[in-house]
Image: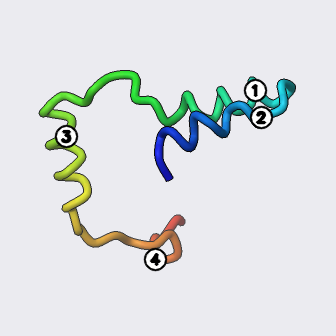
């Protein structure tokens, strides 16, 4: 699918649904570009394979 296809599809959306479509589309547009520090932090978090403990293994008493 191309951007042009999506642009053409807009014309087929009923007027009463335009607001809903707008609210969905706006969520996919980034507000800001991430800084290099943010990119590195995300990559570090994704690479972190530290072991976890399930809730059932914790002695809550």
Q: Nearer the viewer, residue 19 or 38?
A: 19
Q: How crowded is mark 1: few (under 14 residues within 10 Å), some or many (20 or more)?
A: few
Q: Which of marks 3 and 4 is nearer the N terminus?
A: 3
- Residue on which disc 3 sits: 39
Q: Which residue is drawn at 33% across and 22% down?
A: 32
Q: What element carries label 3?
A: helix
The residue where tag 1 is placed is 18
Left or right: where does residue 1 sit relative to residue 34? right
Which of the two labelled residues, at mark 1 and mark 2, occupies the earlier sequence position?
Answer: 2
- The mark found on residue 57 in the picture is 4
Indicate the position of residue 54 as horizontal and vertical percent values: 45, 73
Instruction: Say what secondary structure mark 1 lies in.
Output: helix
- Numbered badge on residue 13: 2
Q: Which of marks 2 and 4 is nearer the N terminus?
A: 2
The answer to whether mark 1 and mark 2 are in CB contact below 8 A is yes
Judge by depth and name the residue closer to the eye, 54 or 25: 25
Mark earlier in primary sequence (4, 1):
1
Question: Residue 16, percent across and down?
Answer: 86, 26
Which mark's residue is nearer the viewer, 3 or 1? 1
Helix, strand or loop at mark 4: helix
Residue 5, located in which quarter of the rendered image?
Answer: top right
Residue at 24% x, 46% y: name it: 42
Residue 24 percent coordinates (x, y): 63, 35
Q: In which quarter of the image is residue 36?
A: top left
């Amino acid at each position: 699918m191309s951007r042009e296809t999506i642009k053409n599809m807009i014309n087929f959306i009923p007027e009463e649904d335009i607001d809903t479509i707008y609210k969905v589309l706006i969520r996919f547009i980034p507000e800001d570009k991430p800084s290099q520090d943010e990119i590195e932090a995300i990559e570090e978090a994704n690479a972190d394979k530290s072991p976890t403990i399930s809730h059932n293994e914790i002695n809550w008493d």
